Image (tube, helix red, strand yellow):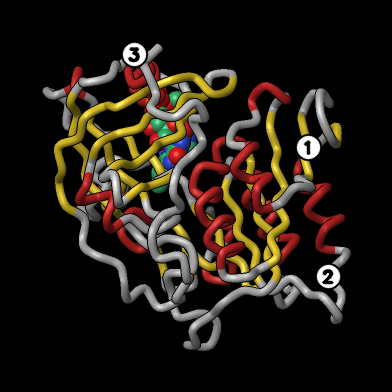
Amino acid sequence: MDENPSDDPYVCEPLHGSHPRGDGTDRVPPALEDANVLSNEPVADDVWLMRLSAPRTAATARPGQFAHVRLSQERDSVLRVPLSFFAATPSEGTISLLYQVLGASTRLMSQMRRGEACDLIGPIGRGWLDRRAPAATIFEPRRAILVAGGLGVAPLATLAENLAATGCRVDVVVGARTTSRIAARERLETVCPDLSIATDDGSEGYHGLITHLVSERLATHVPEDPYDYCAICGPAPMEVAAAHLVQGTGIYAEVSTERLMACGVGACLSCVVPTTRGLVRSCVEGPVFSVEEVVWDEL
Ligand SMILES: Cc1cc2nc3c(=O)[nH]c(=O)nc-3n(C[C@H](O)[C@H](O)[C@H](O)COP(=O)(O)OP(=O)(O)OC[C@H]3O[C@@H](n4cnc5c(N)ncnc54)[C@H](O)[C@@H]3O)c2cc1C
Ligand code: FES
């Protein structure tokens, strides 16, 4: 296992831009950057954390945006792996990626060692609270509910920290197959000590679907202390179910749609999402969309 400069792999600075502006004015165009692996280690079952030196990207990444990473062993391949920013530390010029080992690319990624080179394109896309929303005003949530299914926690961890830094009260609902698959727990607990957890096998928290806990939380949506923001990221069926729960509640809700992506720069149309504006490319116009603009029945 590679050496990590910190004993705690989750000790990272939140992504810069700690005040969610809601107007996307601090977004910069993506660029190609060479990167070096600083550390790469398992942090939960089949879940790894890679820290990379990538100063340009670290300085400009926003929560919910992602990097398109080409692994060193795959220099001949045109395919890249899209991964959300789990953290960025502009002062050190580093970014962190939290990833689940699923197939060939992520397995290869887990074999990379300190000092190995790769390259990435980033930061890509529109992240959380990166739109004039709602009603063309700067939006600063006061009470938020974040819904993280599996590795959906990766783009939500920095959002949780940034919201908390602005004084927003943050509730986090986490769903996982089993307790040993829950990643980033320590970071989430710093902003939400009372995490709501659901596991498929009942090994921790509620035995069943995360959406059960989301409906319970939304039932506390009372006029005196209302949620005004909801952020959702996870497997597509969970996102559909959570979106249906939050629609019509008056809560401004966003979802990070993790579509299959080939080019990552808007050229191939492999990532389109049906919206009220028609089919749009998730890589450049997402991955974060407002729940209201996605046409869920066609997803
Ligand atoms: C914008 C964006 C951000 C992402 N952020 C993260 C992240 O922070 N951490 C993380 O672990 N993963 C993230 N993903 C998913 C990640 O890109 C895929 O898991 C990865 O590409 C799988 O590559 P592979 O070659 O290992 O597996 P493959 O062999 O390509 O795929 C293995 C399985 O995963 C499915 N899969 C592959 N890519 C996706 C995808 N994009 N969405 C849904 N299912 C997929 C395949 O259909 C297949 O069933 C993100 C995806 C997108 C589009
Ligand atoms: S991945 Fe090619 S257009 Fe989005």
Amino acid type shown at disc 3: Gln
Q: Nearer the viewer, residue 21 or 46?
A: 21
Numbered disc total: 3
Secondary-structure class at tag 2: loop
From this viewpoint, is residue 18 visible? Answer: yes
Is residue 60 placed above or below 55 in the rendered structure? below
Query: Considering only order in the chain, which callout, 3 or 2, is on the residue closer to the N terminus?
Result: 3
- The residue located at (16%, 52%) in the rendering is 31
Question: x, y percentage for residue 174?
Answer: 70, 42
Q: Which mark is residue 111?
A: 3
CA–CA distance between discs 2 and 1? 20 Å
| Mark 1 in CB contact with mark 3 (< 8 angstroms) | no
Circle 2 crowding by C-alpha within 10 Å: few under 14, some 14–19, many from 20: some
Of label 1 and label 3, which has the lower sequence position?
A: 3
- Dot 2 corresponds to which residue? 221
- The one of 193 and 65 positioned closer to us in this rendering: 193
Q: Which mark is residue 190?
A: none
Q: Name the secondary structure under disc 3.
A: loop
**What is the three-letter code of the residue carrying label 1?**
Ala
Image side of residue 249 versus residue 283, left or right: right
Q: Please tell me in which quarter of the rendered image ligand 1 is found.
A: top left
Question: Which label was assigned to residue 198?
Answer: 1
Residue at 49% across / 26% down in the picture? 7
Find the distance from the CA under tag 2 to the CA under tag 3. 45 Å
Q: Residues within 10 Å of mark 1 (few under 14, many from 20)?
A: many
What residue is rendered at 67% in x and 74% in y?
142
> In this view of the protein, which residue sits in the foreground, 12 or 227?
12
- The image position of residue 195, as x and y in percent, is 75, 45
* Residue 104, quarter of picture: top left
* Image coordinates for residue 276, horizontal then vertical, percent: 49, 72
The three-letter code of the residue at mark 2 reads: His
